[in-house]
Image (cartoon, helix red, strand yellow):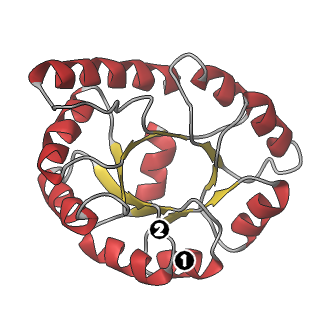
Amino acid sequence: MPTLSKIMEHRLIAIIRGLAPADVQAVAEALYAGGIRLLEVTLNSADPLTVIRQLSEAMSGRMIIGAGTVLDPQMAEAAIAAGARFLLSPVVDADVIRTTKALGAVSIPGAYTPTEIFAAHRAGADLVKVFPATTPAYIRGIAGPFPYIPLLPSGGLTPENIPDYRAAGAVAFGVGSTLIEKADAITPAYLERLTERAARFVAAVAD
């Protein structure tokens, strides 16, 4: 699956949550300039389906757009129809996984305990988002009995700790507020800083 191979290649999914729709395109361009190639729009953001549709068109051939906070099959169907090519959830829902796969998108449910992580994989998840990510040691512990399950930690990741998570066995990473800081206004100076931060994250996941 091309999308899955791109996720495994680029490893870093930038998470957009809560931005004003009018600001998303500028933020996406700044992230792209810093090397980001995978972008998640959470469905609890303002007008997310319109944003996903617009980004999928505007960034076609440059970025792969996905949807996050997908909680039921109806949300999965709507996000994929809008152009999302990978879906993330904060929980394991077998119906969401099945719907996502049936519609040709990449499924990345969120899990934490060994039982949840194994259940997500058995249900067909392409990767499992370990959420919330706590420590690299926890990822290493999970990777011990499940070396065949691709793990994507999310939450609290930084350019400084990503190498430790990689060494522990993580194959990809979800980054939100540590990359895309909240701001009163999306100014040129903010976008320049965002590009610089994105470049640091990209360097952290590079071989």
Amino acid on which the number 1 mark rests in the picture: Val
- Nearest to the eye among marks 2 and 1: give it: 2
Image coords of residue 11 (percent x, y): 49, 39
Residue nearest the viewer, comparing 85 with 131: 131
Mark 1 crowd level (few <14, some 14–19, many ≥20, 10 Å Cα): many
167 w.r.t. 89: above or below: above
5 w.r.t. 196: above or below: below
197 w.r.t. 142: above or below: above
74 sits to left or right of 136: left
Q: Are marks 2 and 1 in contact (CB under 8 Å)?
A: yes
52 sits to left or right of 112: left
Q: Residue 70 carries which label?
A: 2
Residue shown at the point (62%, 42%) measured from the top left:
153
Image coords of residue 113 (percent x, y): 80, 54
What secondary structure is marked by label 1? helix
Mark 2 crowd level (few <14, some 14–19, many ≥20, 10 Å Cα): many
What secondary structure is marked by label 2? loop
Residue shown at the point (65%, 68%) measured from the top left:
92
Q: Distance between the residues labelled 2 and 1?
A: 8 Å
Say which residue label 1 marks: 96
Image coords of residue 28 (percent x, y): 22, 41
Residue shown at the point (54%, 77%) measured from the top left:
96
Residue nearest the viewer, comparing 114 with 143: 114
Residue nearest the viewer, comparing 162 with 187: 187
Q: Which of marks 2 and 1 is nearer the N terminus?
A: 2
Image coords of residue 111 (percent x, y): 69, 57
Residue 201 lies in quadrant: top left
83 w.r.t. 62: above or below: below
